[in-house]
Amino acid sequence: MRSLEKKYGSAVVVDNIDFEVRSGEVFALLGPNGAGKTTTVEILEGVRRRTGGDVRVLGYDPAEDDPSWRARIGVVPQTTGAYLDLTVREVVEHFAAFYPAPLPPDEVIDMVGLTSQRRKQAQQLSGGQLRRLDVAVGVVGDPDLIFLDEPTTGLDPVARREAWDLVRHFADRGKTTVLTTHYLDEVEALAQRAAIIVAGKIVETGPISELGGRKTDRSVVEFVASGALDGLPLPPLPPGSQAREEARRVSVHTHRPTETLAALLPWAHAAGVRELDELRIHRPTLEEVYLQLIKDREEGTR
Ligand SMILES: Nc1ncnc2c1ncn2[C@@H]1O[C@H](COP(=O)(O)OP(=O)(O)OP(=O)(O)O)[C@@H](O)[C@H]1O
């Protein structure tokens, strides 16, 4: 998409967005509530009309709503549930019938873990089971491109992992996934790249491992200087490292965590200490960089 814009009246909710999703990748869309993620995704799905910019999805303009194009995309929206009096199997069969080459409904029901509920009416399912049914409906057409809008909200931890396996299953088959979620562990586990949207604007796009400067950020090597190490001056550390000590807890901020350890271990051994107490090597998590990016944005520093 190039310069994508969506206005409601005079309110600009998607403001000049550019990004590209590559074929075969899991691409995550992140951002606070009301940032414009669902609006963006619904424009890509052909559900909403843009007010500006240019978009191509699988080579088509979604605003043209070509039926053969529509058969190649699958959608799991944030809320569904228009089919509560049908059974699980009926719902999946019903949606399968819309597609030229659907997956076998029983296979899809099995994939989402609803086999033992397949004769139950949708209204008798738990919230998490209904969410699985939403996923079944989204994938039954065997789409090339799947949009998942918060697919694991309300799922228990086991069901979340199963949903992740399902996303991986589709990725392994060469399909492309656009995933909107508030769970950063989910992004880290599934996605290769992400865009972060705040107040309708892109704050950052890139590989998950590089967002917010994660690639170049310093790691922290931490341990407790106990026993013979208490009060012992630290050995020479790699250039650029900075060590701090507070109540015997030593933290070394460094770009070279492995070399730092290589310096610390013989130093500890020479003092007769074989194990560093509470040793931890910490790299900034996606959650930490995300929270920092949002905070910087709110403070206007980025
Ligand atoms: N039909 C509409 N008319 C007017 N404003 C709307 C309409 N739909 C959405 N908005 C506004 O557009 C903005 C973006 O909404 P959107 O649903 O895209 O956010 P989101 O990033 O998906 O949020 P969430 O994480 O809460 O799902 C919000 O401020 C919302 O109030």
Image (cartoon, helix red, strand yellow):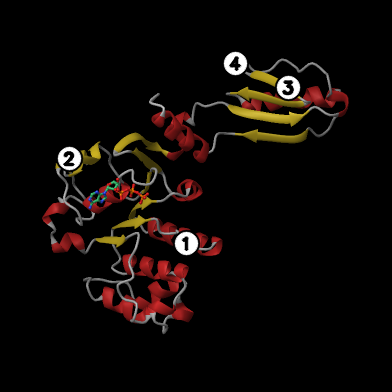
Please state which of the two labelled residues, at mark 2 or mark 4, is closer to the viewer: 2
Residue located beneath label 1 in the image = 154
Horizontal placement of 108 versus 55: left or right? right
Residue located beneath label 3 in the image = 245
Q: Position of residue 158 (x, y in %)?
A: 55, 63
Please state which of the two labelled residues, at mark 1 or mark 2, is closer to the viewer: 2
Whole-angstrom CA distance, mark 1 to mark 3, is: 43 Å
Residue contact between numbered discs 3 and 2, judged by CB atoms under 8 Å: no
Residue located beneath label 2 in the image = 10
Query: Which of the 4 image quadrants contains residue 95?
Result: bottom left
Residue located beneath label 4 in the image = 240
Residue at figure coordinates x 33%, y 70% from the top left: 81
- The earlier-in-sequence mark between 1 and 2 is 2
Return the residue found at the far front: 10
Residue at figure coordinates x 79%, y 22% from the top left: 267
Q: Position of residue 273 (x, y in %)?
A: 85, 29
- Relative vertical location of residue 255 with respect to residue 24 in this rendering, above or below: above
Residue 175 appears in view: no
Q: Residues within 10 Å of mark 4 (few under 14, many from 20)?
A: few
Query: Residue type at mark 4?
Result: Gly
Q: Position of residue 172 (x, y in %)?
A: 40, 57
Which image quarter is the N terminus in?
top left
- Relative vertical location of residue 47 with respect to residue 110 in this rendering, above or below: above
Whole-angstrom CA distance, mark 1 to mark 2, is: 34 Å
Whole-angstrom CA distance, mark 2 to mark 4, is: 50 Å
Q: Identify the element where label 3 is drawn.
A: strand
Whole-angstrom CA distance, mark 3 to mark 4, is: 17 Å
- The earlier-in-sequence mark between 4 and 1 is 1
